[in-house]
Image (cartoon, rainbow, N blue to C red):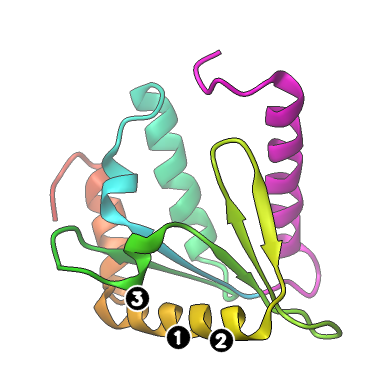
Amino acid sequence: MASGLPASEIEQRVTLRIARREALTKRNPVELIALIGEDALKDKIGTSGVMEDQLRHLLEFSERENVTIQVVKPRIGWHPGHAGPFVLYDFPDAPPVLHFEHFSSGAFVPDADDVLAYRQAISGIRKVALGADASIKLIKGLLKGKEQ
C-alpha cells in the first residue's frame, strides 16, 4: 500500500476523521478553524478527480457558520506552522489538549504550557494567513484551474 501503514491503522485513522467530521455537523457543532498551507491544496495526492473532490469538500464545509478556513501562502518566511501539523481541542467540560499525528503514530498532549504555546502559535499563523474570504476565493480558483 502507498502509505506504508497497515490496513488496521488506516481504518483507525479514517474512523477518527469521520468522528471529527460528525462533530462539525451535529446539532450543536464544534467550531473549527482550519489553517491550511497552500502547498497542501496543490500537492497532487490521488487523481485529479480526488483533488477536485477535496477542494469542493473544503468549499462545502466553509459555508458552515462554525467553520473558518484560512490558507497560508507559501514563501512568506518562517511562522509557527513550519513546526508541523497539530490540532488543538478545546472542550466545554474538560481541559484542552493538543494532538499531533505523525506518520506511524499520534500523541495527545494535555500539558497546559504546551497548550498555551500552541494557542499562541495559532494566533501567529492566523496573522500571516489569508482571511477567510480570500482563502475561499483561492480555493475556488484552484478548483477552476487558475492560480490566485
Secondary element at image label 1 = helix
Image position, residue 111 (x, y; %)? 68, 78
Mark 1, residue position? 120
- Give the crowd class for mark 1: few <14, some 14-19, many >=20 residues within 10 Å: few
Quarter of the image holding residue 54?
A: top left
Vertical placement of residue 147 versus 90, above or below: above
- Give the crowd class for mark 3: few <14, some 14-19, many >=20 residues within 10 Å: many
Q: Nearer the viewer, mark 3 or mark 2?
A: 2
Residue 26 part of the magenta segment: yes
Image position, residue 34 (x, y; %)? 48, 65
Give whichever of discs 3 and 1 has the lower sequence position.
Answer: 1
Mark 2, residue position? 116
Mark 3, residue position? 125
Q: In which quarter of the image is the C terminus?
A: bottom left
The secondary structure making up most of the magenta span is helix
Residue under the point 40% across and 45% down: 55
Quarter of the image holding residue 13?
A: top right
Magenta residues (range): 1-30
Q: In which quarter of the image is the N terminus?
A: top right
Vertical placement of residue 77 versus 43, above or below: below
